[in-house]
Image (cartoon, rainbow, N blue to C red):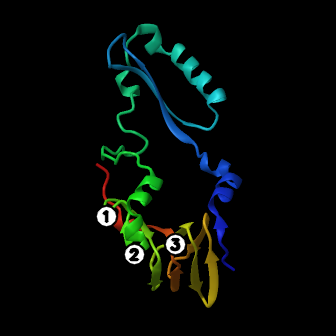
Amino acid sequence: MERPVRVRTWVEENRDSFLPPVCNKLLYYVGNTTDVLFEKWFYCEDLGTQLAPIIQEFFSSEQHRTGKPIPDQLLMDTPFPLSTRSVMEPMSLEAWLAGHRKELQGGASLNLFGDTYETQVIVHGQGSSKGWKQNVDMWLWQLEGSSVVTMGGQHLSLTPDESLLVPARTEYSWERGQGSVALAVTQDPARKKPLG
């Protein structure tokens, strides 16, 4: 049985899940240049225990001893593709909502980031929506007011800070009351654009 989840509570309860290993790169340079003398990529799970051995590896290296890089030891390709895509400036969701309050109160549904990314975030004001078996999951997050989602004959009420996952290929209807503001988030791989 699906049930609404309080977002802040869920984040706190699952905080450790948001700390995946991070791919880091330690670089030493030749003198005062930008030429790389030594580099080491590593997945960091505990900086306190992992960094010291990597630094020691540098101090024990031929590169440190000679001050000259060893070209075939420099990684020419990164462990993942780097994106040179420009991203938007950080924004305040609260300020954005305040600036679009009248539209949302009038029942508008507004695309928060446009069609630039595979993740689509639609901000819904009061009104109703019906979905017919999308190919991707949809995450609903009630920010203000209340709404009712109906799936499989079950009515699920959402109040502020509650969220609900509508599984892929699920028929649903969503009734949003007066004063309701909610996000509908999907991540559709078919919308993914190449890095660059």
| Amino acid at pointer 1 | Asp
Distance between the alpha carbons at the discs numbered 1 and 3: 24 Å
Q: Secondary structure at mark 1?
A: loop
The residue under the point 55% across, 76% down is 167
Say whether residue 8 is left or right of residue 28.
right
The 10 Å Cα crowd at callout 2, few under 14, some 14 to 19, many 20 or more, is few
Disc 3 vs disc 2: Cβ atoms closer than 8 Å?
no
Of circles 2 and 1, the one toward us is: 2
| Towards the viewer: 70 or 83 | 83
Provide residue 131's location: percent of width, then percent of height.
46, 83
User: Which is more N-terminal, label 2 or label 3?
Assistant: 2
Please state which amino acid type lies under the numbered disc 3: Ser
Give 30 or 182, whichever is nearer the viewer.
Answer: 182
Amino acid type at image mark 2: Gly
What separation in Å lies between label 3 and label 2 (alpha carbons)?
A: 11 Å
- Residue 101: image quadrant is bottom left
Residue sitting at the far left: 196
Q: Residues within 10 Å of mark 1 (few under 14, many from 20)?
A: few
According to the picture, the residue beneath numbered tag 1 turns out to be 115
Query: Is disc 3 surrounded by few (<14), some (14 to 19) or many (20+) residues within 10 Å?
Result: many
Per the model, the C-alpha gap separating discs 2 and 1 is: 23 Å
Residue that label 3 marks? 180
Callout 2 touching callout 1 (CB < 8 Å): no
User: Which residue is under mark 2?
Assistant: 106
